[in-house]
Amino acid sequence: MAVAKKMSDFIERSSWIRKMFEEGARLKQEYGAENVFDFSLGNPDLPPPEPLQEALQKEAARRDQGIHGYMPNGGYPYVRKKVAEQVGREQGIQLSESDMIMTCGAAGALNVVMKSILDPGDEVIILSPYFVEYNFYIDNHGGVPVIVRTADDFSLDLGAIEESMTARTKAIIINSPNNPSGQIYTAEELEKLGQLLTKKSGQNGTTIYLISDEPYRNIVFDGMKVPGTLSAYKNAIVVSSYSKELSLAGERIGYLAMHPEIAAKEELVGALTLANRILGFVNAPALMQRVIADVQGVSVDNSVYADRREKFRTILAQAGYTFVLPKGAFYFFPESPLEDDARFVDILKEEKILAVPGRGFGSPGYFRLSFCVEDWVIEGAARGFARAMEAARSA
């Protein structure tokens, strides 16, 4: 076999989003893009904010000697300082440049963290529904993913988390606002989770890290606020990117931030910095580091996503779907009217509607719909959603 067996298995496990993307391309070619309603990808479609465009033009025009050369592997110190100030405000804790590392997106940050903390066989808890690639990032560095269900409304089930913990538990990854459910964990939930991790770390004589993946932090609705993870637990690391709030998914720019009093900080910073280099990232893109330093606190117009959520909410409710209204991010995660979520997604596909089965996110019985699409896509799918529900009820 030319490809590693593990990679062949991974391709099969990660195939749902890729499969729906390919189906979308086929259907658009066959029926015309205007007749296909593609909700499969979480690819931000809003233009970057004007301050970002201006900062990009300014930085691209610079002719300084060495401007595109290497910098410290953790990123430009002045950029880390500016990002630390903003992240500190969001997290409710004072941070400095020594608490930050600039990374190639949140995915790069997660791999840097996993490389730095995991020994072979260490366990990392992930909560379903989850971003499917967490499994692969953990495996990349010898870890073992342990999947724990959330509550019916996708909030934290602390009892289930505690039951899943063993002497090999090294970390838990949380994602709030969550992809795909849109749930936001409350300050009380985070505080109780921090207390649980403190207790278990003491019992096991280890450090259990809380890793919070927060690329949707500033995509929230109804005046919601995302509480700070770093202020809830000392051994916490936040990873994030500017992919969603600045519509920069393809530019691969993000960061990781750690609590200033995290255990063995000097050693951990050394490991994280080295991992950033030896994983092949070397450093976060120089140009984009300088650009985002000038636009801290800037975000896309969130009201556009809020309006789309309301359109989708009305269409799904009128067609009889059951769902938890997303508080953040840009996804709906309704219950499938059929027990077999993949079969129902096929029914939607007959209506030229593209969705992703919940099993792709570790939650069979649901399906994901992305609303980072133009309004006409949502509006044009209304009759198809209604017909698909009728077909499921008569199946």
Image (spheres, rainbow, N blue to C red):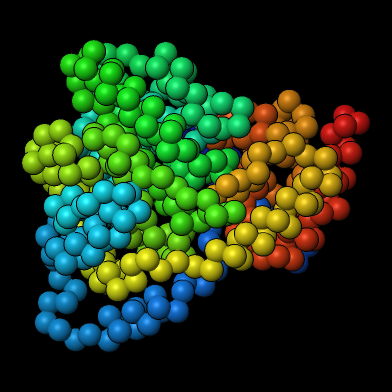
The answer to whether residue 277 is seen in the rendering is no
- Is 150 located above or below residue 26 in the figure? above
- Is 236 located above or below residue 304 in the figure? above
- For this view, does 393 lie left or right of residue 223? right
**From the image, which quarter does the N terminus lie in?**
top left
Name the residue: 35% across, 59% down.
Answer: 252
- Is 38 located above or below residue 333 in the figure? below
Q: Where residue 371 appears, x then y in whole percent? A: 63, 55
Count the labels in the image: 0
- Is 340 located above or below residue 251 in the figure? above
- For this view, does 332 lie left or right of residue 338? left
The answer to whether residue 326 is seen in the rendering is yes
Nearer to the camera, 34 or 306: 306
Name the residue: 52% across, 51% down.
Answer: 224
Nearer to the camera, 280 or 382: 382
Q: Where residue 248 appears, x then y in whole percent? A: 42, 65
**From the image, which quarter does the C terminus lie in?**
top right
Give residue 77's quadrant in the image.
bottom left
Name the residue: 83% across, 40% down.
Answer: 320
Q: Where residue 309 appears, x then y in whole percent? A: 66, 55
Give residue 97's quadrant in the image.
bottom left
Name the residue: 23% across, 68% down.
Answer: 286
Q: Where residue 92 appears, x then y in whole percent? A: 31, 49
- For this view, does 210 lie left or right of residue 395? left
